[in-house]
Image (tube, helix red, strand yellow):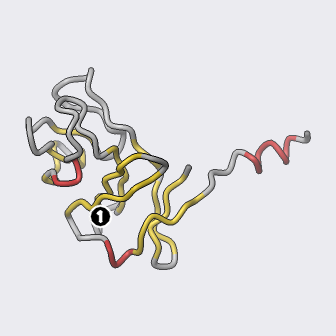
Amino acid sequence: MSAVNRIQSAEPEWITLCQEGDLVPFSGVVAWHQGRQVALFYLPGQSTELYAVDNRDPRSGAQVIGRGLIGDLSGEPVVAAPLYKQHFSLRDGRCLEDPAQMLSTWPVRLRQGRVEIAS
């Protein structure tokens, strides 16, 4: 296989999760992706407008992250988990209070009115 073929095969496959109109500005919505609940956070006007993180709170096990409050801690876009109020970075899923807790994240984009996630 040539180097060009290897590079092309490394491109992610983008899958439509929902429509842009399904998003709620500065809030979360939840979609199903490959057997998991994914929380989508739409921050219009920000340098990165859309984030996709695991909806499962690692501390409680409840599927509630999409209901969390969006905020900014020292320039870091975060979601506060509804039950125990720990803050998770929307960029990389790390918990700011407890490094042992982590949310999975996915590349996500808006394209022609669709919300697409890389798989």
**Residue 80 locus on image (x, y percent):** 14, 44
* Front-lying residue, 84 or 92: 84
- Counting from the top left corner in percent of width and height, residue 79 is at 19, 47
- Residue at left offset 35%, top offset 49%: 37
Residue at 34 percent of width and 47 percent of height: 53
Total count of labels: 1
Q: Quadrant of residue 43?
A: bottom left
Q: Quick check: 108 above or below 62? A: below
Q: Residue at x 19, y 24 (%)?
A: 98
Say left or right for 82 vs 41: left
The answer to whether 80 is drawn above or below residue 15 in the figure is above
99 to the left or right of 108: left
- Residue type (three-letter) at the residue carrying disc 1: Tyr
Residue 1 drawn at (x, y percent):
91, 39
**Viewer-nearest residue: 56 or 2:** 56
Left-right relation of 114 to 93: right
> Alpha-carbon neighbours of circle 1 within 10 Å: few (<14), some, or many (≥20)?
many
The residue sitting at the top extreme is 100
Q: Which residue is mark 1?
A: 42
Look at the numbered disc 1 and give the secondary structure of its residue. Answer: strand
For residue 7, above or below residue 103: below
- Image coordinates of residue 18 in percent, x first then y, are 42, 69
Q: Quadrant of residue 32?
A: bottom left
